[in-house]
Amino acid sequence: MATDTLASPAVTGSGTTKIYKNFIDGEWVESSTGETFENRNPADTRDLVGIFQKSGKADVDTAIEAAQRAYVKWRMVPAPKRAEIVFRAAEMLLERKEQYARDMTREMGKVIKETRGDTQEAIDTAYYMAGEGRRMFGPTTPSELPNKFAMAVRNPLGVCAMITPWNFPMAIPSWKLLPAIVCGNTCVIKPAQDTPLSTYNLVQTLSDAGVPHGVINIVSGFGSKIGAPLMDHPLVRAISLTGSTEVGRIVGTAAAKNFKHCSLELGGKNPMIVLDDANLDLALDGGLWGGFGTTGQRCTATSRIIVQKGVYSEFVDRYVERAKKLKVGNGLDESVEMGPAVNEAQMKTDLDYVEIGKSEGAKLLCGGNRLDQGDYKYGWFLEPTVFGDVDPKMRIAQEEIFGPVVSIIPCDDLDQAIEIANDIDYGLSSALYTKDVNKAFRAMRDLYAGITYINAPTIGAEVHLPFGGVKATGNGHREGGIGAIDFYTEWKSIYVDYSDTLQRAQIDNAD
């Protein structure tokens, strides 16, 4: 949990609390404001993870200017050489994985097995993007004229601004930073105020691997004090945001005014369909992991489960029974299966939606309460919560909650299930459990989402495939795989005429 304080940047308490500074032009520096904020463990708010800079516009401007200076040289470094640095960073991340995972659990709350996975995703992204430094292919094509060569190459954009969320505080920054720098761009990143340490750990590793001064810069702080200067600065040529749809609309509008490239990865309300012929044991495993992994705090979380009526009662009974048994607690305990909400505000949002669901007439089958006894009282814990007999038009079935609240919706058949799944503002991830290959292929075709899983939950994307969604989930760009390379480069078409005569294209040249 991040709390806004006015403390001076100095060691506090016992003298062991770490003060983290902004990283600008290769140096760790205090903010121009002289203000800081605390980063506390959401599972135990007595645990102060660190103190971070509460920056202002002057810090953003300084970081962008450093990035612009670095860009002049960095763009000229051959892409394979840029990629070699990223490969070294992958090797270092692998060595540091356990410590970084433990840091992440302390600041974000999700269980240690998941934070190891988050760190591993950054490692995987680094290895993949290191390979892209030797690919970055462009097409060659025949010219319509003789003795003329035609091709297209990728060019970097310039300074890229990045605003990242708290739920995957190392993986998602890696999705943005690593392809950007391999492509020859420079970066200024604002980490989420709830989870800045994991981004600092990633950037420290990249610096240790040899990324030159100014290529990557971190400015920590709050909301519009950082975001608006990043978006509006004339030297910033691209903006990448992972966040809410509401913030995405603001960022997209600001970017459009100045013709900046803009990638928006926003919300989700993801359906998992379970048909009568499904392997119920497998579907239950997937639904529990998708619904309560990361405490439901994923844009791809399985927040809606649409179950065919032939197996509805059995599925609901077994799902609720297992949800009640999930062990909730501090994620550093290897036996814990679900951690806390990331902060008090998110916990209150979750509880508000529980009340909304009850008022709408959904059946609260389990959970719905804050856990606040014993050690729970020091954190933001909720019970795993399941609503049954949910109408698809209810708010709990339409709006992103971002917490451990799952809605189960009955359906008659696959056609109705797909209709329910698609009748939503979002379109990020989707899943279908069935043994019928014909139905599986119909779902792959007809589910309107950026991602579809067959016999797997709605979470679990891999770094070498495009990641993103449709409708209110984003603006058409993709992270991961070649989609990231596409965003962080511009095409340049090149023609070489070696005929030694004037040849006029696009006119009648039949002779």
Image: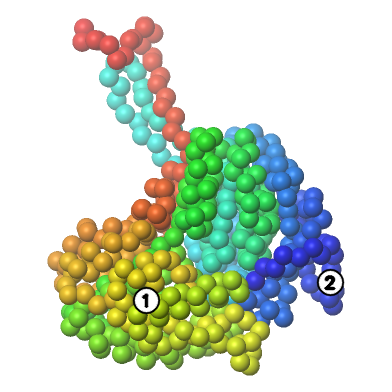
Say which residue appears at 73% left-offset and 68% top-offset: 38
Q: Position of residue 296 (x, y in %)?
A: 46, 74
Q: Is residue 453 above or below residue 58?
A: below
- x and y percent of residue 128 in the render? 47, 55
Q: Which mark is residue 360?
A: 1
Q: Residue at x 53, y 47 (%)?
A: 251
Q: Quadrant of the C terminus?
A: top left
Query: Under tag 1, what secondary structure?
Result: helix
Closer to viewer: mark 1 or mark 2: 1
Disc 2 marks which amino acid? Thr
Residue 232 visible in rendering: yes
Which mark is first along the chain, 2 or 1?
2
Secondary structure state at the residue bearing disc 2? loop
For the residues marked 1 and 2, what is the alpha-carbon distance in whole angstroms? 48 Å
Image point (64%, 34%), residue name = 72
Residue 484, given in percent of the width and then of the height, sits at 45, 48
Classify 10 Å Cα crowding around label 2: few (below 14), some (14-19), many (20 and above).
Answer: some
Task: Tell me if I can see residue 133 in this picture.
Answer: no
**Considering depth in this image, is 18 or 235 the residue closer to the camera?**
235
Label 1 environment density (alpha carbons within 10 Å; few <14, some 14–19, many ≥20): some
Residue placed at 18% from the left, 62% from the top? Answer: 442
Report whether 251 appears left or right of 16: left
Residue 429 occupies which quadrant of the picture?
A: bottom left
Say whether marks 1 and 2 touch (CB < 8 Å). Answer: no
Horizontal side of residue 480 vs 66, given as left or right: left
Task: Specify whether 93 is left or right of 365.
Answer: right
Depicted 34 relative to depicted 60: above or below: below
Left or right side of 438 for 123: right
User: Which residue is disc 2 drawn over?
Assistant: 12
**Quadrant of the image containing the N terminus:** bottom right
> Residue 143's quadrant in the figure?
top left
